[in-house]
Image (cartoon, helix red, strand yellow):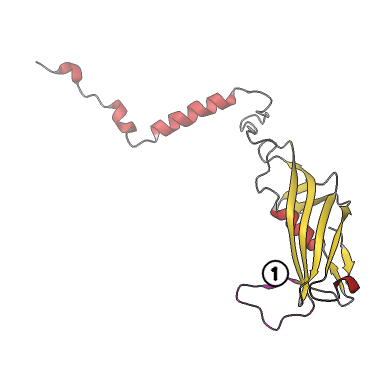
Amino acid sequence: MDALIFALDERLANPGDTWSVGGHLDETGYELGDHEFALPQGIDYDVVLTNAGEGILATGLVRAHVVGTCDRCLEDAEFDVAGEVDGYYLFEEPERLAEDEDEADYELVLPDRTIDLSGALLAALVMETPFVVLCREDCLGLCPVCGANLNEGDCGHVAQLEERRERERLESSPFAALAGLDFGEGDQEG
């Protein structure tokens, strides 16, 4: 994501001062793990910057329409994302961190008294992106035999696979050895 720089001026000069910023970014996409996502309509954001004394707190919302690839059928999967922006930009490096903090909890205000909101916006977008991407909740995926998209019709292999799995399950049962035993029920004399 390209940098989104805001210069800290008199609007945020004193603790408690706030400045509302918002806009649209023409970002084309982002990656998460081995997934690539397109942003055909870019990203919209509404953020409030607050002078918190030791730094600038950025809170707000980021929204985007996202297009990815379905993990089951490999077709396009579209969904909307709305994430909460939460960034903290310290004026000075802390001498020591609290026990529950690490360096990922903050960034520093740059020497030219600017902050870059792109990281906080991207983090909010990523946090709301589903781990498993589906074109629809009941996606049937691809046939493991022929690769046909099962959402478009049954290729016939699914029933064959189910039968084979059931047969293997029965054969692997510890009671399968009993199936061939002859208990001699017809040989008994009364």
Position of the N terminus, as image quadrant, is bottom right
Give the residue pinned by disc 1: 105
Note whether 51 is above or below 139 in the view shown. Answer: below
Label 1 sits on a secondary structure element that is helix
Q: Which residue is pictured at 71% across the width and 49% down the height? A: 129
Kindly identify the amino acid type of the residue bearing the numbered disc 1. Asp
Quarter residue 21 falls in: bottom right
Report how many numbered discs are placed on residues in the image.
Answer: 1
Note whether 24 is above or below 116 in the view shown. Answer: above
The residue sitting at the left extreme is: 190
Q: Is residue 159 left or right of residue 65?
A: left
Q: Position of residue 92 (x, y in %)?
A: 78, 80
Q: Is residue 182 left or right of residue 95?
A: left
Q: Residues within 10 Å of mark 1 (few under 14, many from 20)?
A: few
In the rendered image, residue 95 lying in the magenta stretch gets the answer: yes
Q: Position of residue 35 (x, y in %)?
A: 73, 48
In the rendered image, residue 170 lying in the magenta stretch gets the answer: no
| Residue 32 visible within the image | no
Q: Which residue is pictured at 70% across the width and 51% down the height? A: 128
Quarter residue 174 falls in: top left
Specify the segment rendered in magenta: 91-106
Note whether 152 is above or below 106 in the view shown. Answer: above
Q: Main secondary structure of the magenta part?
A: loop
Q: Position of residue 162 (x, y in %)?
A: 51, 28
Note whether 2 is above or below 38 in the view shown. Answer: below
Q: Is residue 161 left or right of residue 133?
A: left
Quarter residue 187 falls in: top left
| Residue 139 visible within the image | yes
* Front in this rendered view, residue 142 or 109: 109
Position of the C terminus, as image quadrant, is top left
